[in-house]
Image (tube, rainbow, N blue to C red):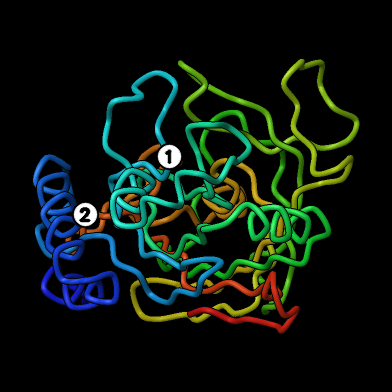
């Protein structure tokens, strides 16, 4: 795990005084952030002049929320570390060069553009389905009945990987805090979400059955809020510790059992295929 001493060493490329100032700025900011535990902090996994792959801990937001813009986020941490990245204009001004989000409860890799050209190029790849993200998800070892609001589940629980779970999505429940799959023909709902007119797809590329749990390796291209969490709950395998989707508690670790482990895209400058894991 990269710590602040290592980050300080890395910043020497900017000059000793700049390194100390940046380090102190980051350290002061992190002390005011709320992490799941003291050792689980953001760090840069790999970086070029165009982009950075960053580890996001569980229990921090990827970008500022409109309802609470002052809350510290992964983007705030990165902007303090790389101030020039604040010049990138993202989908929303408050999101900067963040190319995709992870849920508050989810940990793992996030790709951040450091230049406008990189943001625009990788965003185009996302639109074309060329930006692929891989996750590891863990569920209880036995199938369960989905919670209220789910349509009949697809018959996939006995199918060996690979297989695909697909649907549209609609908001559900008090405060619209969760989502539910929606299938053609759609019920009348003004907030139905489709992926460019088609279903969102969750590709299960590996399914490992252990004595007390099942581990899924999953790939998505263009994701929707809670997509993996909702789709796995739909087929009877909600994530461990995912109380929103009736997942079983897991006493060994209080964090949501979902980790963004890898992504693939083309380098925005060279076009070379890049894999980060």
- Which image quarter is the N terminus in? bottom left
Question: What's the mark number on residue 63?
Answer: 1
| Cα distance in 3D space between marks 2 and 1 | 23 Å
Q: Residue at x 18, y 65 (%)?
A: 19
* Quarter of the rendering containing residue 232: bottom right
Decide: is 162 above or below 104.
below
Q: Residue at x 35, y 47 (%)?
A: 105
Estimate the x, y position of residue 133 in percent, counting from the top left. Answer: 60, 66
Decide: is 126 above or below 90.
below
Q: Which residue is mark 2?
A: 254
Bin the neighbour count of mark 2 within 10 Å (Cα to Cα): few under 14, some 14-19, many 20 and up: few
Q: Nearer the viewer, residue 254 or 143?
A: 254
Q: Comparing marks 2 and 1, which lies closer to the viewer?
A: 1
* Quarter of the rendering containing residue 269: bottom right
Q: Residue at x 17, y 42 (%)?
A: 33
Q: Is residue 61 left or right of residue 132?
A: left
Estimate the x, y position of residue 37 in percent, counting from the top left. Answer: 12, 56
Q: Is residue 17 left or right of residue 171?
A: left
Of pointers 2 and 1, the one earlier in the residue sequence = 1
Bin the neighbour count of mark 1 within 10 Å (Cα to Cα): few under 14, some 14-19, many 20 and up: many
Q: Residue at x 44, y 21 (%)?
A: 66
Estimate the x, y position of residue 254 in percent, counting from the top left. Answer: 21, 54
Q: Nearer the viewer, residue 131 or 269?
A: 269
Task: For mark 1, give the secondary structure.
Answer: loop
């Amino acid at each position: 795990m990269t710590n602040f001493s290592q980050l300080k060493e890395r910043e020497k490329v900017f000059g000793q005084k700049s390194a100390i100032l940046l380090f102190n700025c980051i350290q002061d900011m992190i002390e005011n952030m709320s992490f799941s535990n003291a050792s689980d902090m953001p760090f840069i996994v790999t970086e070029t002049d165009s982009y950075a792959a960053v580890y996001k801990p569980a229990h921090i937001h990827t970008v500022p929320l409109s309802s609470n813009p002052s809350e510290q986020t992964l983007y705030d941490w990165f902007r303090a570390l790389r101030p020039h990245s604040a010049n990138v204009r993202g989908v929303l001004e408050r999101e900067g060069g963040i190319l995709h989000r992870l849920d508050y409860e989810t940990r793992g890799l996030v790709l951040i553009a450091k230049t406008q050209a990189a943001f625009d190029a990788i965003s185009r790849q996302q639109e074309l389905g060329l930006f692929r993200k891989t996750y590891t998800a863990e569920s209880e070892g036995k199938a369960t009945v989905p919670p209220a609001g789910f349509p009949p589940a697809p018959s996939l629980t006995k199918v060996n990987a690979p297989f695909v779970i697909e649907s549209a999505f609609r908001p559900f429940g008090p405060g619209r805090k969760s989502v539910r799959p929606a299938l053609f023909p759609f019920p009348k709902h003004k907030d139905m979400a489709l992926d460019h007119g088609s279903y969102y797809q969750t590709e299960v590329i590996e399914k490992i059955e252990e004595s007390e749990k099942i581990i899924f390796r999953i790939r998505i291209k263009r994701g929707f809020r809670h997509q993996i969490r909702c789709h796995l709950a739909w087929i009877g395998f909600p994530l461990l510790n995912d109380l929103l989707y009736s997942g079983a508690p897991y006493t060994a670790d209080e964090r949501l059992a979902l980790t963004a482990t890898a992504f693939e895209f083309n380098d925005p400058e060279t076009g070379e295929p890049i894999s980060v894991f």
